[in-house]
Amino acid sequence: MSNVRKLSLAGVLIALGVVCSTFYIPIGASKCFPIQHMVNVIAGVLLGPFYGMAMAFVTSLLRVLMGTGTLLAFPGSMVGAFFCGLLYQSTKRLPLAYVGEVIGTGVLGGLLAYPMATLILGKEAALFAYVLPFIISSFGGATISILLLAALQRTGVFGNIKVALGTK
């Protein structure tokens, strides 16, 4: 039963990420989507690294198909959600999940965006061209998720969701 609940929550997070993809902040050569990063943290924490990564993949795919995202959404969001979920799953500490999103998306995803931009999209870019914009974007999304998850913890909803998903 918990798999159905996890898939349902992943579907809701995908919908939120896609619907809110019209809101972005242009930073340098990239479009920054703080809501995507907030969703990555929530998915990583509540669903785990693999569900989080799958959720990020589907969200990125839908955004690209709808024209509200670029191929650069794949490496950043997927690595960020996975790394966030991995750190939270191994430590059960939310601050490390937030750091995981910023490092996973900002540093690792930013570096992985370079070959995608140069080889697939044919853009000229420096190796670290996407790191700073991805860090800024993921930091904004992680900050939003800090506020949201803190509210869920204060009200007891966070624990109830984890129990319902079988992840507590």
Image (tube, rainbow, N blue to C red):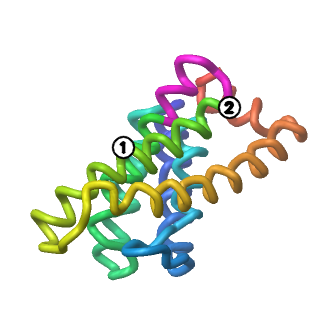
Indicate the quadrant where residue 16 lies. Answer: bottom right
Residue under label 2, please give it.
Answer: 94
Q: Amino acid at mark 1?
A: Leu
At x 82%, y 37%, the residue is 153
Secondary structure of the residue carrying numbered label 2: helix
Q: Earlier in the sequence, mark 1 or mark 2?
A: 2
Where 93 sits versus 143, above or below?
A: above
At x 46%, y 58%, the residue is 132
Q: Quadrant of the C terminus?
A: top right
Indicate the quadrant where residue 38 lies. Answer: bottom right
In the image, 50 versus 120, the foreground residue is: 120
Residue 92 on the magenta segment: yes
Residue under label 1, please give it.
Answer: 108
Q: Amino acid at mark 2?
A: Leu
The overriding secondary structure of the stretch rendered in magenta is: helix
Q: Is residue 42 shown left or right of residue 60?
A: right
Q: Is residue 75 shown left or right of residue 91?
A: left
Where 11 sits versus 96, above or below?
A: below
Q: Disc 1 and disc 2: Cα gap in Å?
A: 20 Å
Residue 53 on the magenta segment: no
Where 160 sits versus 70, above or below?
A: above
At x 41%, y 53%, the residue is 77
Q: Is residue 53 shown left or right of residue 114?
A: right
Q: Spot the residue most to the right.
A: 154
In the image, 127 versus 71, the foreground residue is: 127
Q: Residues within 10 Å of mark 1 (few under 14, many from 20)?
A: many
* Magenta-drawn segment: 84-94
Secondary structure of the residue carrying numbered label 1: helix
Rendering coords of residue 80 (x, y %): 44, 44
